[in-house]
Image (spheres, helix red, strand yellow):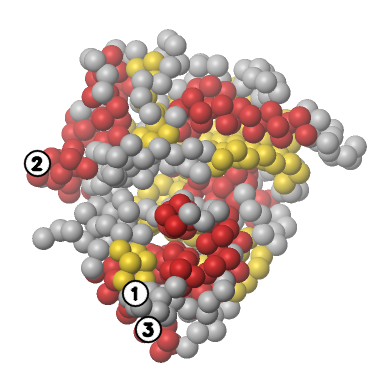
Amino acid sequence: MLDDTMSDRPLILAIDQGTSNTKAILVDEGGTVVGGASRRMDIEYPQPGWVQQDANAIWTAVRDCVDEVLTAAGSPALAGVGISNQRESGVAWERASGRPVGPVVTWQCRRSAELCDRLRGAGRAAEIEARTGLPLDPGFTAGKWRWLLDQVPDGAARAAAGDILLGTVDSWVLWHLSGGTVHATDVSNASRTQLMDLDTLAWDPSLGEAFGLPLAALPEIRPSSTRFGQTVATGMLPAGVPVGSLVGDSHAALFGHAGFQPGAIKATYGTGSSLMMPTPTRVDSDSGLAATVAWGLASGTTYALEGNINVTGAAVQWLADFVGLEGPAAVAAMAASVPSTEGIYLVPAFTGLGAPHWDDAARGLVSGLTRGSTLSQLARAALDSIAYQVRDVFEAMQAASGGALQVLMVDGGVTRNEQLMQFQADILGVPVQRNDTPELSAMGAAYLAGLSTGTWASIDELAALPRTIDTFEPTMSAAERARLVSGWQDAVARTTLRP
């Protein structure tokens, strides 16, 4: 329970619905997290390349986390609710009943690869990228929505008539929080669907036609920081609390870092990873990066360059499952017992390679094994693969920015691993700054909600809030870095299955 000095100050409730975990935190006006709750999420792999979750289980986890954190805090007054979410995952549900008509097809899922290949063969890829800033790829939402509607009798017709709604996870959570009265998303999530024109910030009829999706079924696009509606009474959550933000989790993390200005670059480490750098206007890259929206405020829209990595933390979980270890912590402990991989590389291209390679035909690979190789060295290779993939995107961003990037800001659960953070700094050759707030995506959603509900007046006020930063300085020689990176690049080149 909050102490008496805090209990009369309205707090921001921030919900972070991620792939592996759903979390809820309470944030006070000083930017301090004063309560939190978490639930682990189940992930299903029905066949190779397919990844899905249960939409009802997502809502149940959100509701349980909110109930837990509000109960522990003694039912505090709330100024607003903010939501950050796993991006690109597609949901479809019936308007009348709220019943999902299929699974949540997650961002990692490749089941729409055949549709993307057809669009590529029809010459639509260049148009789609020009309008959306995104390369044609099954990781984005439009193809997932098309697949979901194809599984329902008369699915497209029902969606065009308004009987079936399409949304990303933020839309699904907002629908429930508002008692089914608000169907909306924000510009950051909409920019990841391959259906929003990146210049007009509106759903594009030509893109809807390309994917065979009725725009009438899509949520209304709004700024990331605005009043989306009010809550209905749900468990411990009272009615009438304004929902003040929706934002994709990677965008939220950049906002939580106070990375408001061009030149800032952050990496969010999770099941997969995202590197993002704000830009004042749209910037298109030929380095394997995507142009996207960072966030939308009342004062205008901030754009970004982004590189998405399909599998980072998930590689550690995979190894734990594969060899029967007790989770990622056991893998990390084994990795910490050896000074290096002794030439082993693990490239976790389990669902293809994302930025900057964009090769959906790539598959995972372990190379460099000898008779003397050990499981501990393979565990170290799994951790190191995260840093190598982040480096690939960091280098692409450096090329796109036209100048040297001086530091990488990092967040996410795996950044608690000191060995990995030191190796990340070493393999980049620049300092790595770790924000001490573990729930930075939720914090970014709280900041955005607080702006729209009056807790904070401006981003300058947010930038002035105290933050604790740990810095990892590179110590590796340039020659050793070059040797290791060359080995990694050789391993990546071996993963493709394309002719």
* Residue beneath the point at 44% across and 29% down: 54
Q: Which mark is residue 122?
A: 2
The residue identified by callout 3 is: 482
Classify mark 1: helix, strand or loop.
Answer: loop
- Left or right, 453 with respect to 431, comes to right
Q: Are marks 1 and 2 in contact (CB under 8 Å)?
A: no
Q: Earlier in the sequence, mark 1 or mark 3?
A: 1
Q: Is residue 451 visible?
A: no
Quadrant location of the C terminus? bottom left
**Distance between mark 1 and mark 3 Cα atoms:** 20 Å
- Left or right, 361 with respect to 12, comes to left
* Residue beneath the point at 21% across and 33% down: 211
The residue identified by callout 1 is: 369
Q: Earlier in the sequence, mark 1 or mark 2?
A: 2
Please, what is the three-letter code of the amino acid marked with disc 1?
A: Leu
For disc 2, the neighbor class at 10 Å (few under 14, some 14 to 19, many from 20) is few
Vertical arrangement, residue 366 with respect to residue 363, above or below: below
Q: Are marks 2 and 3 in contact (CB under 8 Å)?
A: no
For disc 1, the neighbor class at 10 Å (few under 14, some 14 to 19, many from 20) is some
